[in-house]
Amino acid sequence: MSTAPPTTPRRLPLAGVLRLGRPTDIWFKPAVSVVAAVAVPNLTLLALGRLDLAMYTMAGSLCALYGHNRPYPARARTLAQVVLGMVGGLAVALVTASLTTNAVVLVTVGALMAAVQKVLCDATRVGPPGNVVLTFISSASLFAPQTLGQVPGHLGLALAAGAWAWLVGMAPGLLRPHGPERRATAHALNATAAYADRHADTRGTGRGTGRGGTGGRTGGGHDKARAAAVAAVQAAWQSLLAAGARPDRTRRALAHLVVRAEVALAAPADTDPRLLRALARDLRGTGRVPRVAGFDDDLLGVDAERAVPRRPLRRRLGPLAPLAARTALGCALAGYASLALGVGRPYWALVTAASLYQANVTLTWSRGIQRVVGNLLGVLVFAAVVPFARLHPAVLVLCCLAFNFGAEALIGRNYWLGSVCVTPMALLITEFARTQDAGQLVTERVVDTLVGALVGFGAAVVVTNRRAGDGIEHALTTVERAREQAARLLAEVQPAPRALATARRALAAALADLRATADTASGEWWQRALPQERVVQAEQSGHRTLAAMVRRQGTHSWDGARTTEDVRP
């Protein structure tokens, strides 16, 4: 590892932080799911005249936000784990609230819980919305008046709502059981088609180098397209592997299409992007899954890969220690600062700080700008809506449902846009128990947003993450070992097809991890000089080896023509 002195802080970006992106392919799924999960418990409480209990049912209902990109067998497990984690955090918060009303103690407990929730969500890659929803519920519950005798009933409400959210999340599987795997495979095909297009453009301008364009650097756009394609292919494999070991003809056909995407990634010059996009279009809806001619199951090597044990959770938690320290310190200091300013809801500042922390300081800065802009606009929306929402409890419930839908529909385009809906929704939830002074709510939310963002970002700068550089060294070692294993197989006269496929995918996964790790470390402050040249060389040699493996298996000559045999879902 380089012993060069730490680098100076990088410039914090402003351009593009608030730029809107394209909505995700399934933006409506979490939006509809959360509305369905929240509506039934809230309308039931409305009918019973007990909207004051809505905070506890919301804890379970919001679990419907998770797992929408996972295959249904994996989604069932993920949703169950999220529900248990949500109820567990709620239990700690309610018991603590029933034992003490000391605000400093409550903020401290909330900060520690936020750190635990952050690292567990990151280590398990539970996906959006990550730890923020868990932290919001547990932190708010710390400041809800409570007695020990009430805790079991409130936890029962959360668990019942969580069970309903589980059913809502799993329901689409009855109509489209392979939907997530189909989407992941289509995304891999489209991403490799984009890479093939970019490769053709660079060849046309004379900037491509190396056989098949894999041997040298061809410009930032080319490299970004390749990295995106590698990540999409890896995500497609992970989706198929997460579905479990149960034999399934549809998933086998999808795996063949992912192999086809790998072929295009390794040999873009021999790829027809239009064909890849046509295959991706065929995966929409519930139609037949095309089978690709010339691909044998031995090329998949999936059984061998499933047999490899996963890394223990404790090993995945280790590298996240600096992030845990940032979260705990930042959330605690934000809460204490809010208390010092006399704000009645310090958990808002705590949650704001918790929502900032991303993989590195640069991304944390961007999230902070997005959070502040979204919250400030959101309080204006709340001020405009609250007179209407107070006309009747039913109107209040409907407004919250509308903001729930808007938040999930818009947050994929940019975090700040979703926050414009999240903020009034969170403020209206406080109205379930009793009507409050709207001006005071707005003032306190603005103060807590600014305090949480400033203090939270300050903690991110102060608590350095030197392990980011160590992660690059580990990723480089993994790539080198995977490439050496692939080279040994290529040197054999007749390597086993399954072994070759497994080694090829291991190398592709290692390259994807190296790129993600390098991107993370490059946005971190106070780092040693990063081995950028080694990273570039490792990526170039790794992609050359991938291309050689494809040629060795004979897949470079397959044009992906579809046979008459299609697989029904």
Image: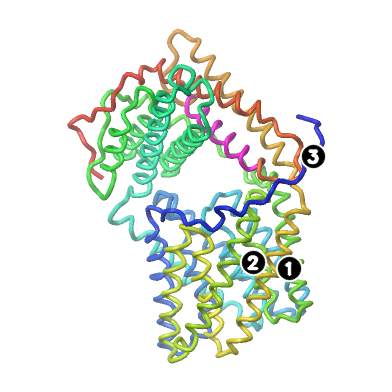
Query: Residue 334 shows which numbered tag?
Result: 1
Question: Is 209 situated above or below 324?
Answer: above
Residue 437 placement, left or right of 336 = left
| Residue type, numbered disc 3 | Pro
* The residue stretch that appears in magenta: 504-521
Residue closest to the far top: 493
The image quarter containing residue 291 is: top left
Discs 1, 2 touching: Cβ within 8 Å: yes
Residue drawn 44% across the image and 36% down it: 233
Q: Earlier in the sequence, mark 1 or mark 2?
A: 1
Q: CA distance from mark 1 to mark 3?
A: 28 Å
Query: Looking at the figure, which quarter contains the C terminus?
Result: top left
Q: CA distance from mark 1 to mark 2?
A: 8 Å
Residue drawn 65% across the image and 62% down it: 354
Query: Residue 6 shows which numbered tag?
Result: 3
**Dot 2 corresponds to which residue?**
352
Q: Which SS class for mark 2?
A: helix
Q: CA distance from mark 2 to mark 3?
A: 30 Å
The image quarter containing residue 488 is: top right
Q: Which SS class for mark 3?
A: loop
Where residue 545 appears, as percent x and y from the top left, is 50, 19
Residue closest to the far left: 564
Q: Mark 3, residues whose alpha carbon is within 10 Å: few (<14), some, or many (≥20)?
A: few
Q: Mark 1, residues whose alpha carbon is within 10 Å: few (<14), some, or many (≥20)?
A: many
Magenta residues, dominant SS class: helix
Is 509 included in the stretch rendered in magenta? yes
Where residue 126 appears, as percent x and y from the top left, is 53, 53
Where residue 147 appears, as percent x and y from the top left, is 66, 83
Q: Nearer the viewer, mark 1 or mark 3?
A: 3
Residue 394 placement, left or right of 437 = left
Residue drawn 79% across the image and 39% down it: 6
